């Protein structure tokens, strides 16, 4: 009888385990499968990881097993089964902003789970079931930790699989000797610049770019293995990083001929630890270029200007100090127009739907690389007309009631946020509403930078909605420094509450800036 009840308990534990660890695996996926970053997440949300209520309820059956009387064992099984049924019924799938994807890697984790549970089934039927079930109960108490343990177990397998995919991608690139590779990196502006460069260069060349925000090593490798063909002439490769050496790992595979450096700033300081490490990592792209390669650099960025770049360098910017720069800038609510000054050639007048100086800067960089690759002025102008805002990056949307939304939800850096606030400020004849949770992944600089964001927000907004009680504190402190009226600040628990408040105050003459949106691993 006890063996049957033990097996029933194990089946229920397996079902509950699948439900609860799905969230843990989603967090691991959002952290790009970095085990150490998942460990940091567990520490940050220790109350979720160590759920006292669940530990207490699962301890009762263990205590009953330790007492080891016929009555206590039966009571223990009854409590165990009812507790597990309660957990299964009450464990709901959490709302996800970025959907959990059951990739091949996730499937391998599930296989490891299954193997471990099969071992548990065998042991429970050949050894003392009380000991085995107690051990499994402890694993269930700390299901999020178990995700970490299984990831460590699978690490050698994943490393070997990763090596194979990288080798395949490198071989595929070598099979297309005339393919030119353009690498794009920076603390911000990478994705927008990638789309702009691709749109303009596709007027002359058959291009392939890494899609969406695919900028990790495996995202780049997957793009090459699945989409690159001998027909492609240019591969535009976005390169992201959270650790020193991440960019070099990508460049060692793709061997870029040209590189675009959009910015160097205080991003991902929780992993980089210092701005110097950020600079070192971003310059890995420039260092990887061949002797005849070209580095296109944003000359408005002081950290880039202060870097020692020895490769062939082309400077782009908004002033005459750069080789390619924008002048006669005209920004309206509907877009921007400006001239791009080109060395030894006539200027090109660009008209675009994109908003803000940051996007103008990105377009100038794209024009610079297009000019070097032989595009004509007409091809560049036509390409610029086709440029569309990247989803959630200063994307202007019209509401049916006449109000407007500036969707900058995917921006997560202080310079980009300041530029977005400048765009909001330019809507002088409208009620300007800001919704933001601030900026994350800034390490010990988080309070300082978010306080600066608060000061800028006070100068640009008529009403400010902050998201997250703890997250809002430094932003609110910055707002108060500017003597901003407290009645025009609202602190919401989450985005849903923030949007509800927005709907209460919005009018047809309002413009709303959605600045950054916390990912699931910060909720």
Image: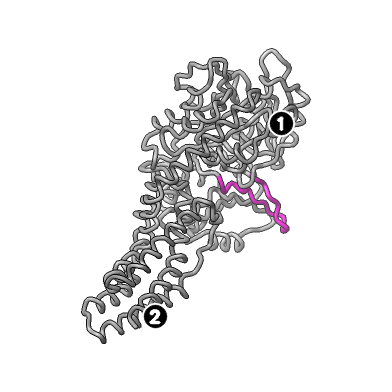
Can you tell which mark lies on residue 231?
A: 1
Residue 65 in the image: above or below residue 484:
below
Near-viewer residue (211 or 114) = 114
- Residue pushed farthest front? 126
Q: Check residue 409 for magenta coloring.
A: yes
Q: Would you identify the image quadrant in which residue 179 lies? A: top right
Q: Would you identify the image quadrant in which residue 352 lies? A: top right
Near-viewer residue (339 or 183) = 183
Check contact, mark 2 vs mark 1: CB within 8 A: no
Q: Residue 301: x percent and y percent?
A: 51, 27
Q: Residues within 10 Å of mark 2 (few under 14, many from 20)?
A: few
Q: Please tell me which of labels 2 and 1 falls first in the chain.
A: 2
Q: Say which quadrant the N terminus sits in.
A: bottom left
Q: Residue 363: x percent and y percent?
A: 65, 30
Q: Name the residue beneath numbered marker 2.
A: 82
- Residue pushed farthest top? 344
Q: Residue 400: x percent and y percent?
A: 73, 58
Residue displayed at 22% across by 83% down: 69
Q: Is mark 1 on a helix, strand or loop?
A: loop
In this picture, which residue range is highlighted in magenta? Answer: 395-410
For marks 2 and 1, give the CA distance: 61 Å
Near-viewer residue (168 or 142) = 168
Residue displayed at 30% across by 84% down: 75
Q: What element carries label 2?
A: helix
**Left or right of 437, for residue 448:** left
Q: Residue 510: x percent and y percent?
A: 65, 53
Residue displayed at 50% across by 64% down: 94
Can you tell which mark lies on residue 329?
A: none
Near-viewer residue (170 or 315) = 170
Residue 79 in the image: above or below residue 391:
below
Q: Nearer the viewer, mark 2 or mark 1?
A: 1
Q: Residues within 10 Å of mark 1 (few under 14, many from 20)?
A: few
């Amino acid at each position: 009888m006890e063996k049957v009840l033990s097996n029933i308990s194990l089946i229920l534990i397996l079902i509950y385990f699948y439900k609860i660890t799905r969230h843990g695996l989603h967090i691991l996926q959002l952290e790009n499968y970095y085990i150490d970053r998942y460990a940091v997440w567990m520490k940050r949300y220790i109350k979720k990881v160590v759920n006292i209520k669940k530990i207490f309820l699962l301890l009762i059956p263990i205590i009953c097993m330790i007492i080891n009387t016929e009555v206590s064992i039966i009571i223990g099984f009854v409590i165990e089964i009812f507790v597990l049924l309660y957990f299964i019924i009450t464990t709901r799938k959490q709302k996800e902003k970025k959907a959990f994807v059951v990739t091949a890697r996730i499937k391998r984790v599930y296989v490891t789970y299954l193997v471990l549970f099969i071992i548990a089934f065998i042991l429970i039927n050949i050894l003392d079931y009380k000991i085995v079930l107690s051990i499994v109960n402890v694993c269930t108490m700390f299901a999020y930790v178990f995700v970490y343990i299984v990831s460590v177990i699978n690490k050698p397998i994943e490393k070997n699989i990763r090596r194979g995919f990288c080798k395949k991608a490198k071989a595929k690139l070598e099979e297309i000797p005339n393919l030119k590779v353009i690498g794009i990196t920076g603390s911000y502006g990478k994705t927008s610049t990638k789309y702009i460069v691709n749109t303009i260069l596709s007027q002359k060349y058959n291009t392939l770019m890494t899609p969406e925000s695919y900028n990790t090593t495996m995202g780049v490798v997957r793009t090459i293995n699945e989409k690159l063909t001998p027909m492609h002439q240019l591969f535009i490769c976005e390169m992201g990083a959270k650790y020193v050496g991440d960019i070099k790992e990508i460049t060692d595979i793709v061997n870029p001929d040209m590189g675009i450096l959009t910015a160097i700033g205080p991003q991902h300081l929780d992993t980089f630890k210092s701005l110097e490490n950020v600079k070192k990592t971003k310059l890995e792209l420039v260092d990887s270029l061949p002797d005849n390669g070209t580095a296109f650099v944003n000359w408005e960025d002081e950290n880039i200007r202060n870097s020692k770049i020895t490769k062939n360098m082309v400077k782009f910017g908004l002033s005459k100090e750069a080789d390619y720069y924008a002048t006669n800038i005209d920004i309206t609510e509907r877009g921007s127009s400006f001239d791009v000054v080109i060395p030894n050639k006539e200027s090109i007048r660009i008209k675009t739907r994109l908003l803000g100086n940051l996007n103008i800067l990105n377009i100038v960089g794209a024009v610079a690389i297009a000019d070097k690759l032989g595009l004509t002025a007409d091809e560049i102008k036509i390409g610029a007309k086709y440029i569309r805002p990247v989803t959630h990056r200063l994307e202007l949307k019209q509401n049916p009631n006449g109000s407007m939304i500036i969707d900058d939800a995917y921006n997560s850096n202080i310079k980009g946020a300041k530029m977005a606030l400048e765009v909001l400020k330019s809507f002088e004849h409208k009620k300007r509403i800001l919704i933001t949770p601030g900026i994350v992944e800034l390490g010990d600089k988080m309070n300082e930078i978010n306080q600066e964001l608060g000061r800028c927000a006070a100068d640009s907004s008529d009403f400010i909605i902050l998201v997250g009680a703890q997250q809002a504190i430094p932003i609110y402190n910055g707002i108060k420094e500017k003597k901003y009226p407290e009645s025009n600040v609202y602190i919401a628990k989450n985005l849903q509450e923030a949007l509800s408040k927005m709907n209460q105050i919005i009018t047809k003459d309002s413009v709303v800036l959605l600045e950054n949106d916390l990912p699931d691993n910060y909720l």
